[in-house]
Amino acid sequence: MSFLDFYKVYTLRSKKGAHYLELNAAQILGTIKKLELRIENRFPQSGLLQVCKEFEDEASRARKLSLQLSEPIWPVRLAIIAAALVLLYIGFSVVAALVQRFSLDTQDFSEILQASEAALNELIFFSLALYFLINLEKRLKQHVALKALHRLRSVAHVVDMHQLTKDPADLLAKNQLAVEPKKPQLSSYELTRYLDYCSELLALISKVSALFAQYMDDPVVLTAVNDLQSLTQGLSGKIWQKIMILDLAVE
């Protein structure tokens, strides 16, 4: 089997099972909506509910953005092609003019060296300009994706701030000296549910960020997605430590 045949077979198999091998953005948004309803039913006045609602809007924007970034930006691409053609034309014109000006019969060897050096510098300049133009679309997509991932990272920190004040030690302490009035505390079951909702939110943030890695083949974006997923996993680990403390206390 040739490489071309292997590529065709692999592509065909990938298309057949794509809906099982890729994240479904619509399903992720549906899961976020279900989590929002669960939080609203149990904690209708909580700030966590507002965070979930705003995260749902952010996830919807991230879904549209990730799909847009997977497609070519044709205005930018056409402008790059036009600019590249202009640069190539100018470069070839300069080289052709230098070739016509000097021939093998030229006696002034130093002048030939100077002209060759000038032509080489021009070629280097045009090569760098072409490299910049060719990678312009990639850098634009990269910049937009990193900004979206930065917003998701901020949401993860906001979720962590909401669970940070939910300390199981306050609930489990038998003798507390109330120095100042405290808000009504959540029960052990309610606190467990609250922390579990925070953990689910962090997991969904990680899945939304993975949409950018799924639709974009960019090492910088992939690194940013991995960093965000590591962050959410670490924050979720702290939450589950609290849940385990509550479970052990109940037992």
Image (cartoon, rainbow, N blue to C red):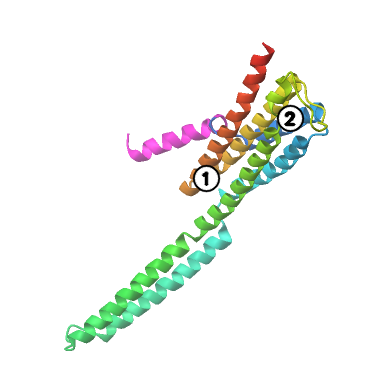
Q: Classify residue 73 as left or right of residue 100.
A: right
Q: Magenta stretch containing residue 10, yes or no?
A: yes
Mark 2 lies on a secondary structure that is: helix
Q: Classify residue 115 as left or right of residue 175.
A: left
- Residue in the foreground of this view, choosing between 243 and 113: 243
Q: Do labels 1 and 2 touch, CB within 8 Å?
A: no
Q: Position of residue 75 (x, y in %)?
A: 58, 62
Magenta residues, as a range?
1-20
Mark 1 lies on a secondary structure that is: helix
- Residue in the foreground of this view, choosing between 117 and 67: 117
- Residue in the foreground of this view, choosing between 176 and 191: 176
Check the picture and name the quadrant holding the C terminus. Answer: top right
Label number found at residue 34: 2
Examine the image and state in which quarter residue 245 appears.
Answer: top right
Which residue lies at the image location 59% right of the left edge and 41% below the top edge? 209
Total residue callouts:
2
Which residue lies at the image location 28% right of the left edge and 83% below the top edge? 100
Q: Position of residue 135 (x, y in %)?
A: 46, 59
The kind of residue on which mark 1 rests is: Ala
Which residue lies at the image location 77% right of the left edge and 35% below the top edge? 49
